[in-house]
Image: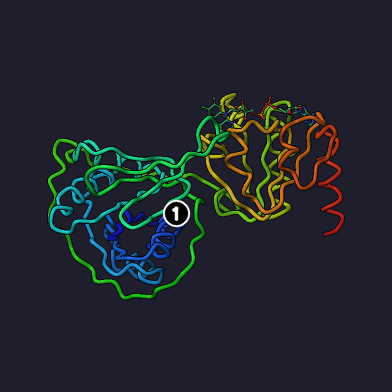
Amino acid sequence: MKIWIFAESENGAPTTATLEMVTKARELGGTLEAVYVGTDVASVATGLGEHGVTKVFGVDPDGVLAGVVGAAAIAGLIGAEAPDLILFAQTYDGRDAIGRLSARLDRTVLTNGMSLTVEGDSVRVGTAIFGGAQLVDTLFEGEKPYLAAIRPKSFVAAPGGAATPEIVAVGAVDAGRAGEAKILERHVEEREGPKLEEAVVVVSGGRGIGEAANYEPLVEQLANLLSGASGASRAIVDAGWVPYSKQVGQTGKTVKPKLYIALGISGATQHMVGMKGSDNIIAVNKDGEAPIFSVADLGIVGDLTKVVPALIEAIKARG
Ligand SMILES: Cc1cc2nc3c(=O)[nH]c(=O)nc-3n(C[C@H](O)[C@H](O)[C@H](O)COP(=O)(O)OP(=O)(O)OC[C@H]3O[C@@H](n4cnc5c(N)ncnc54)[C@H](O)[C@@H]3O)c2cc1C
């Protein structure tokens, strides 16, 4: 089986989501190659090689969105290269690329993948449906390559199968009218502390925090004291209390920290699907019947406006 990864990068290195897919694909065996859209292909290829990628097709974005150029480049390459399966991270660029490629090739896609199984020639992608209440495995049929988008944090990234990848520069691609739109500016969201998806500790707040003004002194303070990141349920994102980038869950981010603290979050399946893989879960909720306690290792039944300040004081007192 020949597996391709649509690689993405951050600061000259492959993103964790990319390396998670590479690691999984390496475990499945066969040929492992990547397509990367960017001007820093040499440094990104090094990181990919450390995880087992043997060949990287480098595509010059020429000021155009990676998904636009990537889909056009892959569509042009697959005839000669014949990959069996192409994996994209369920990210902005990954979704852009897989959607465009699906339209170009008139090929079905499986998105939101959380597991991947290969048996001989057949490929299965596992996804969660009904807000995470049911898991289904879907088997690809029809013409290859199969196209799948995988949710970040579905696999664990680990180096292995070290290779010095061959870098193949892909010539100019015809991205059609979409290629006429150029990126003029990029804005990096300001953030203090670790990234939500990478943090070892995540403290999230839900509607139970009462009002927007409580997020900073309760949720963010506790997260900062624990050198963690602050997250949120969708309820308070929809209410406009915190930005969408903080949302944990089915339509937000998936996190797998060593410690997840849920403050005033009821534990809807759509929230839990994004955090139940955490190593340790602590929940504070005034309702002893709240579903969040079904996944909590430690549950505190109480008013968070009293529990959290006391916890913050206790942590501060320890220095
Ligand atoms: C298609 C779809 C996708 C969705 N995706 C997501 C997603 O990605 N992420 C997500 O989070 N949700 C998602 N949702 C929404 C989800 O169904 C819930 O509505 C949401 O998670 C509820 O947020 P919450 O727990 O903060 O609020 P609530 O359900 O209102 O819970 C608030 C909790 O706070 C407790 N509480 C209240 N006051 C206090 C207090 N003083 N002290 C302690 N506890 C207190 C209450 O007992 C209650 O359990 C999605 C829904 C749909 C339909």
Does any portion of residue 9 appear in the rendered image? yes
Residue name at image x 29 percent, y 71 percent: 165
Q: Quadrant of residue 214?
A: top right
Q: Quadrant of residue 302?
A: top right
Residue 169 placement (x, y as % from top left) = 18, 63
Ligand 1 sits in quadrant: top right
Residue 258 placement (x, y as % from top left) = 67, 55
Q: Tell me the quadrant of the picture where the N terminus can be found.
A: bottom left
Outermost residue on the top side: it is 239
**Quick check: 133 above or below 151?**
above
**Quick check: 63 above or below 217?**
below
* The one of 77 and 110 positioned closer to us in this rendering: 110
Color encoding of the figure: rainbow
Does any portion of residue 217 appear in the rendered image? no
Report which residue position mark 1 lands on.
17
Count numbered badges in the picture: 1
Residue 314 appears left or right of 216: right
Residue 299 appears left or right of 150: right
Residue 53 appears left or right of 59: right
Residue name at image x 56 percent, y 54 percent: 198
